[in-house]
Image (tube, rainbow, N blue to C red):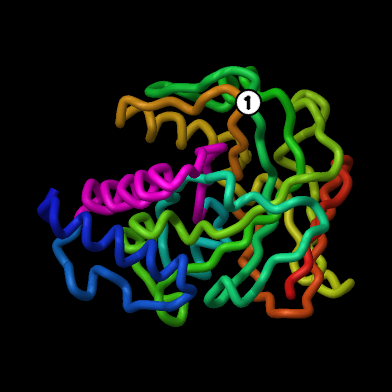
Amino acid sequence: MNLNTDTLDRLAEHLESCELQARDTPKITDEHPRMDWEDAYAIQDRILARKQARGARVIGYKAGLTSHAKMKQMGVETPVFGFLVDSFSVAEGASVKTAELIHPKVEPEIAFVLKRSLQGPGCHIGAVLAATDFVLPGIEVIDSRYRDFKFDLKSVVADNTSAARFVVGGRPLRPDAVDLRTVGIVLEKNGVPVALGAGAAVLGHPAAAIAMLANHLGQRGQEIPAGSVILSGGVTEAVAVAAGDHVCLRVQDMGSVSLHFD
């Protein structure tokens, strides 16, 4: 670590305040160019602790920047991971208030729900599939707190990988009932297809992202608990949304899930 405890606490308070007040900020590495990976995840941990102190409950995790399209869009090469708390969850078909967000975008995802815990090191795709209860469509609403959506990887890790809202729905399937590599997805905005893809866009297989998350947490002495919902990463590039938009994700054999923005 290169940052002291007071600085980590201050940055966590700053970033979470930006989230809660829907205001942007320059990326924090502008002020702290020596910030390292441990610092970034320590800031994320502090943001989570702040939320838990107010009663938030961790319900899952997310992998970010896992598709080649998303990596290219954001100019990065390494996946990142964040947490999901209950306040991020939105009911299927419900409305998201854009006034509570800065510059929201949506990503089509394949979500995993675990029937037993996973822990690295050494977690692999087979272990993930064996521990998965079911998979289903998910839409993540990302909302980087950084001005103009411009950030580096350490800054975005500190900002809980731009997590804001998410919805899951459709028809849950057991993982052995679908080929997650070839399953096709269509993301529609206001009835018009805006992004197409297949599961293999996420690291060759969406379960690979879950394995990487388990190994990441294992290095920190943590696990993915049974019952967790995990967003495996955007299958396509993120799509900007605004008030009045309706977004629907259709996943082959898994049905659809949708959100409104007002």
Which residue in the structure is indicated by mark 1? 114
Q: Residue furthest toward the front? A: 54
- Examine the structure image and report whether residue 59 is included in the region drawn in magenta: yes
Can you give x and y, in whole percent of width and height, for residue 135 in the image? 73, 34
- Examine the structure image and report whether residue 5 is included in the region drawn in magenta: no
Can you give x and y, in whole percent of width and height, for residue 126 in the image? 59, 21
Above-or-below relation of 118 to 213? above
Occupied quadrant, residue 259: bottom right
Q: Residues within 10 Å of mark 1 (few under 14, many from 20)?
A: many
**What is the count of numbered marks?**
1
Q: Quadrant of the C terminus?
A: bottom right
Q: Residue at x 23, y 46 (%)?
A: 38
Can you give x and y, in whole percent of width and height, for residue 205 in the image? 62, 39
Please tell me whether mark 1 sits on a helix, a strand or a loop. strand
Q: Is 195 positioned to the left or the right of 49 in the image?
A: right
Can you give x and y, in whole percent of width and height, for residue 7 in the image? 16, 59
Q: Is 180 positioned to the left or the right of 177 in the image?
A: left
Q: Residue at x 76, y 40 (%)?
A: 136
Occupied quadrant, residue 245: bottom right
Q: Residue at x 53, y 67 (%)?
A: 143
Q: Is 202 positioned to the left or the right of 47 in the image?
A: right
Magenta-colored span? 36-65
Above-or-below relation of 83 to 18? above
Q: Residue at x 69, y 79 (%)?
A: 242
Above-or-below relation of 157 to 215? below
Q: Is 191 positioned to the left or the right of 111 in the image?
A: right
Occupied quadrant, residue 25: bottom left
Above-or-below relation of 70 to 101? above
For the residue marked with disc 1, what is the amino acid? Leu
